Image (spheres, rainbow, N blue to C red):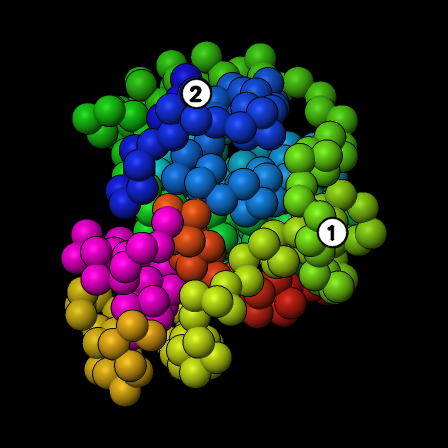
């Protein structure tokens, strides 16, 4: 069961996939039942790192799978990522929590107070405004899941189609429940921590947030942080402008498609085309268009596009990850 259409990148044929990519995709299918995020596969270090962070926090990390699926779905609601909302309510059906899946899909409070508190915390996690409703022991898995999906939501909204299933079939509760049933045995299986680390590239950022501990979640985060550097694609001036704009927006989402143009106007033309992609990925990825990508391309590869978008996503994600705490 492989889903997700790529918006701006050319899908890789199986013959074009490296042994490392095949290994990552096989690991995904074994642990969650499908291969994820095909557009990100054009940059293997980023693909490996986000898979490792997702797997080691949400699938194999501390905390219940139900709690972490709730967090993934609620973060996705806050970020308006239709694909991820559908995916993680489907996984809640897979672990037989149909009541919570339906409540989240309908944007209604679940009956269980703990689940309601988790949803509130996850939706507020970009503003770190709500005390964490989980134990210190569970923090690496639950906070790691929230941080993972702040990154994933931005990449999916920018580079991939919003439909989980062809024709928008995920809008049907019956279809979501049936799809969840097909994933049930995989979702309920025990998963050994640490097995995604072997896929990572060699680069690591020196530091990780305190909540991530010292094990595989921390290592996956440091690998993602290192893989998403794009100093050759984005000038220091453009990077500083994006950071300042993201900070000024403070989590708000401009509704007009051309909102970024006055902000980018003082950059040189080629700087502007790159900064536009990174800034829109950081904030309103669904506003990216074919014209935006075409204006920037100028010989750049699909791997370059993934890295540039990921740099933008991390401009938003790193302050969130740094500010979240267990208190």
Tag 1 residue: 218
Residue 181 or 44: which is nearer the viewer?
Answer: 44
| Residue 31 picture quarter | top right
Earlier-in-chain disc, 1 versus 2: 2
Q: Nearer the viewer, residue 325 or 204?
A: 204
Q: Is residue 286 magenta?
A: yes
Farthest bottom residue? 266
Horizontal arrangement in the rendering, residue 250 relative to residue 220 (left or right)? left
The residue shown at (31%, 18%) is 174
| Residue depicted at x 58% and y 54% | 227
Q: Residues within 10 Å of mark 1 (few under 14, many from 20)?
A: many
Q: Residue at horizontal 58%, vertical 13%? A: 185
Please indicate, yes or no, whether residue 112 appears anywhere in the rendered image.
no
Helix, strand or loop for disc 1: helix
Of helix, strand and loop, which one carries label 2? loop
Instruction: Give the x, y percent position of residue 128.
Output: 57, 67
Q: Quadrant of residue 278?
A: bottom left
Measuring from the top left, give residue 173's x and y in whole percent.
31, 24
Q: Is 279 contained in the magenta span?
A: yes
State which region is magenta: 272-301
Q: Which disc number belongs to residue 15? A: 2
Q: Is residue 290 at least partly visible in the picture?
A: yes
């Amino acid at each position: 069961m492989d889903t997700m259409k790529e918006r701006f990148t050319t899908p890789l044929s199986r013959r074009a996939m490296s042994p490392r990519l095949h290994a990552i995709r096989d690991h995904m299918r074994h642990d969650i039942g499908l291969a994820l995020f095909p557009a990100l596969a054009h940059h293997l270090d980023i693909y490996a790192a986000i898979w490792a962070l997702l797997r080691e926090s949400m699938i194999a990390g501390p905390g219940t799978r139900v709690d972490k699926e709730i967090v993934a779905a609620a973060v996705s609601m806050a970020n308006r990522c239709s694909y991820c909302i559908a995916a993680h309510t489907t996984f809640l059906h897979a672990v037989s929590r149909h009541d919570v899946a339906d409540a989240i899909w309908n944007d209604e409070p679940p009956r269980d107070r703990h689940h309601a508190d988790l949803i509130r915390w996850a939706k507020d996690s970009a503003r770190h405004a709500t005390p964490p409703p989980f134990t210190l022991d569970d923090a690496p898995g639950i906070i790691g899941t929230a941080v993972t999906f702040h990154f994933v939501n931005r990449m999916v909204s920018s580079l991939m189609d919003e439909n989980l299933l062809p024709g928008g079939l995920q809008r049907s509760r019956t279809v979501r429940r049936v799809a969840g049933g097909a994933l049930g045995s995989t979702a309920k299986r025990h998963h050994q921590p640490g097995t995604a680390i072997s896929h990572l590239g060699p680069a690591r950022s020196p530091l990780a947030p305190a909540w991530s501990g010292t094990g595989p979640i921390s290592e996956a985060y440091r690998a993602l942080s290192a893989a998403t550097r794009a100093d050759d694609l984005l000038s220091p001036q453009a990077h500083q402008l994006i950071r300042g704009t993201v900070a000024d927006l403070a989590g708000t989402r401009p509704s007009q498609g051309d909102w970024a143009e006055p902000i980018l106007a003082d950059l040189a033309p080629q700087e502007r085309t790159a900064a536009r992609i990174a800034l829109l990925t950081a904030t309103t990825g669904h506003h990216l268009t074919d014209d935006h990508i075409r204006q920037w391309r100028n010989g750049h590869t699909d791997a370059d596009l993934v890295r540039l978008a990921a740099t933008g996503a991390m401009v938003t994600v790193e302050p969130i990850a740094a500010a979240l705490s267990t208190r």
